[in-house]
Amino acid sequence: SYVLTQPPSVSVAPGETARITCGGDNIGSSTVHWYQQKPGQAPVLVIYYDSDRPSGIPDRFSGSNSGNTATLTISGVEAGDEADYYCQVWDSSSDQVFGTGTKVTVL
Amino acid sequence: QVHLVESGGGLVNPGGSLRLSCAASGFTFSDYYMTWIRQAPGKGLEWLSYISNSGRIISYADSVKGRLTVSRDNAKKSLHLQMYSLRADDTAVYYCARVESGSSSYYFDHWGQGTLVSVSS
């Protein structure tokens, strides 16, 4: 089955840039989606098709995908960005796959 | 706006069954694939199943195949998940979500708030 690996945690100071990686075999040939989940809440889509933002998502959130790594970048991090983040792809053998999740802590 | 509300969760004995429902509003339900995703306490997201807008195409994760049945009622704008032979490791919050699909991928653009299923004696 297809595995997506994320770092368990990322810490960043307010105003700095957080980069969350999602590693998978040749993930660059797939399209990657990203979700934000705050404690006690349902996940929210923040990036789809590698780099598109749904309406209402600040342009501080951006995404890229190439080779074996997809990256979610949060620029000018704010306290409200503290959350768990998950990547997701569709894989022909495993169907829908989520990454292991990354907890972003704002220092 | 899009609104999804899950119901039917609760405490169930190991080996028991449970039927979850998801009520949809704010969009044309019959136009969209729908999906179920769960999250065990303190753990990550696990995709379980999706069903096409017509109900004719269904897919399950290998980990739950044979123990789950997904269905929908487009007239009632509702999605269902029948779960059988429940085990302790099925304890989780169960989310329904709307699926957006393109030529190369699927993603989940709106989620319900989830319903908690606890499997314990």
Image (cartoon, coloured by chain):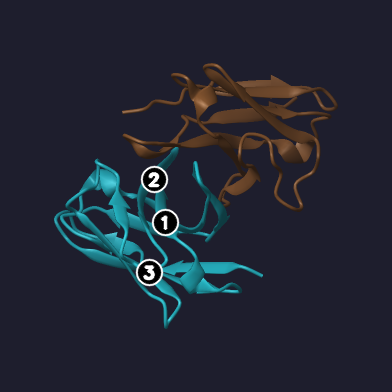
Q: Chain of mark 1?
A: B
Eye-nearest disc, 1 or 3: 3
Residue at the extreme bottom:
B75
| Quadrant of the image containing the C terminus of chain B | bottom left
Residue shown at the point (76%, 52%) measured from the top left: A56
> Which comes before the other along the chain, label 2 or label 1?
1
Residue B118 lies left or right of residue A77; in this view the side is left
Q: Position of residue B17 (x, y in %)?
A: 20, 63
Spot occupied by residue A8 in the image (x, y as percentages of width and height): 53, 23
- Residue indicated by mark 2: B47
Identify which amino acid the numbered label 2 is placed on: Trp
- Three-letter residue code for mark 3: Ser
What residue did someone put label 1 on?
B35
Task: Give the position of the N terminus of chain B as an image quadrant.
Answer: bottom right
Chain (cyan): B
Q: Tell me the SS state at disc 1.
A: strand
* Distance Cα–Cα, label 3 vs label 2: 20 Å
Residue lying at the far top of the rendered structure: A67
State whether residue A68 appears in this view: yes
Q: Disc 3 designates what residue?
A: B54
The image shows residue B83, relative to residue B59, as above or below, that is below
- CA distance for labels 2 and 1: 8 Å
Q: Earlier in the sequence, mark 1 or mark 3?
A: 1
Tell me which chain the residue with mark 2 is part of. Answer: B
Q: Mark 3 or mark 2: which comes first in sequence?
A: 2
Q: Are marks 2 and 1 in contact (CB under 8 Å)?
A: yes
